[in-house]
Image (cartoon, helix red, strand yellow):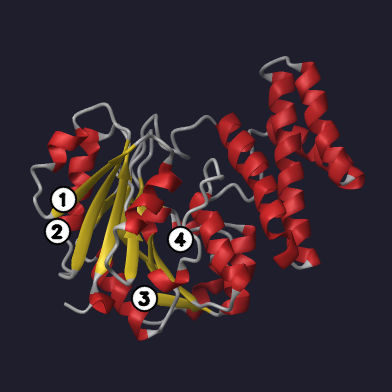
Amino acid sequence: MNNENLVTIIIPTFNRAPKLIDAIESAINQTYKYKQIIVIDDGSIDDTAELVKKYPQVEYHYKENGGQASARNEGLKYAKGEIIASLDSDDVWYPEFLNNCITKLEEENLDFVFANWEQESRIGNPWDFLSSDPFLTPYFVKEKDGWIILEYNEVRDLFIKSCPSPSSSVVIKRSSILNGWDEEMNIGDDWCMYLELILSRKCRVGFTLQKLWKKRIDEINIYDGRKWSEVLEFLYIADVKAKIIKFKHLLTPKELKILEERYMGGLVEFAKHNLIRELNFKYSFNLLVRSFAVNIPFTLREIPKVLMKGLHGKVLPNQKL
């Protein structure tokens, strides 16, 4: 088999044996035939290893716990395919996911594609995630044959503002992965990987609003399983600051401003949380000082906005991943 046609599926997992079964079987049952399936066990202490033995067509590799990015990068070491897809062990692909995504990837010579999904809800029925994404809606007019193709300037603008493509939604050319998933990120390791590509060279991306997979949630999800305060602390403060440091030399002044304002917005929102919910006045004050150190006028404008949003039960803009 020509490795150009082969897709390597990387399934990172940590103590998710019951859900892992569904993820593995959804990968096996893809209508796309040419696939290598790798499970990277990121230090599980449940019966993950025994479970994977039931699937002889699946490669299993164990490593010490290091987080989702390190597990994906470990999988990349064993990858034989020139196309890469990472499936989180709590998610499920529908049978046509790979076939539809790889077909479009190759037809349009794209760097990566991503697909819409059904988002599981803690209360009520699953919901269509991307169709109401405010960062994507301006591009819906470009839809053709169920897909929307984004040219370089559009890709760059979109991914500076938002990351509408979690790992399970993406099929990417191996040649478009420059240095793998960023292991310094707390949550947004995939977002950082896409930005590294986008800011380094011109690329093209496609997406479909067809729901081709299902995102499930539980208490140990990297993003959905966390408290909102933890998402603020890790994704909108620590990760954004790290991205600013890493990519500052590649950003335009406008792009840098967008990231700095997201960082300051996270600091102000987290300061409000610590003041009102935790009664931690000192830490709240220190967070505001960090925001003032970046831009005093913006911070002064942001404080009343965040307080008003809190009164109306709202959260930060740009919240979507």
Q: CA distance from mark 1 to mark 3?
A: 26 Å
Q: Nearer the viewer, mark 1 or mark 3?
A: 1
- The numbered mark, 1 or 4, whose residue comes first in the sequence reads 1
Please give the residue where the numbered disc 3 appears in the rendered image.
Answer: 146
Confirm or deny contact between disc 2 and disc 1 (CB under 8 A).
Answer: yes
Instruction: Identify the mark at residue 131; answer none if there is no mark.
Output: 4
* Residue plotted at (63% across, 77% down): 153
- The numbered mark, 4 or 3, whose residue comes first in the sequence reads 4
Q: CA distance from mark 1 to mark 4?
A: 27 Å
Compared to residue 162, the image places residue 64 above or below, namely above
Name the kind of residue labelled 4 in the image: Ser
Please give the residue where the numbered disc 2 appears in the rendered image.
Answer: 29
- The numbered mark, 3 or 2, whose residue comes first in the sequence reads 2
* Residue plotted at (39% across, 69% down): 174
Q: CA distance from mark 4 to mark 3?
A: 13 Å
Q: CA distance from mark 2 to mark 4?
A: 26 Å
* Residue plotted at (76% across, 32% down): 307
Quick check: can you spot residue 86?
A: no
Element under disc 3 = loop
Name the kind of residue labelled 2 in the image: Asn
Element under disc 2 = loop
